[in-house]
Amino acid sequence: MAKLWVRLIIKNKIWRQDTEPLQGAEPTLANSKEALDEVLKRLDEPRPIWMPSHERQFLGYGQARFLPEHFVERVNFERMELETIE
């Protein structure tokens, strides 16, 4: 079963991380966003704004990176990385 691995990075080190199983037989953008919502609730972090470039990265490579400017609220990390893992 695939999982979504969420990492919050500060100074090129993992500050906080969590995983969430993806629903369904195959990873999709929709079930990945649902898993991301669950992880962000547990980590008490805001949800990023998904730009078309993030969607292309995630669908093409199974990973995406979000910077502080991709959030409406202020965040305390340098970037958030998403990756699908088995």
Image (tube, rainbow, N blue to C red):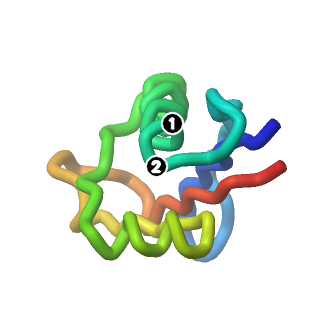
Camera-side residue: 64 or 9? 64
Q: What type is the residue that disc 1 sits on?
A: Asn
- Which residue is found at the position 82% from the left and 36% from the top? 1
Q: Is residue 84 left or right of residue 72?
A: right
Q: Position of residue 72 (x, y in %)?
A: 15, 50
Rendered residue at 65%/30% (across/down): 24
Q: CA distance from mark 1 to mark 2?
A: 6 Å
Q: Which residue is mark 2?
A: 29
Q: Give the structural element (helix, strand or loop) at label 1.
A: helix
Q: Residues within 10 Å of mark 2 (few under 14, many from 20)?
A: few
Left or right: residue 16 versus residue 67 is right
Q: Which residue is mark 1?
A: 31
Residues marked 1 and 2 touching at CB (< 8 Å): yes
In the drawing, what numbered circle is on residue 17?
none
Task: Check disc 2 and report its element: helix, strand or loop.
Answer: helix
- Residue type marked 2: Leu
Does 52 sit above or below residue 40?
A: below
Residue at the extreme left of the image, as rendered: 72
The residue most toward the front is 25
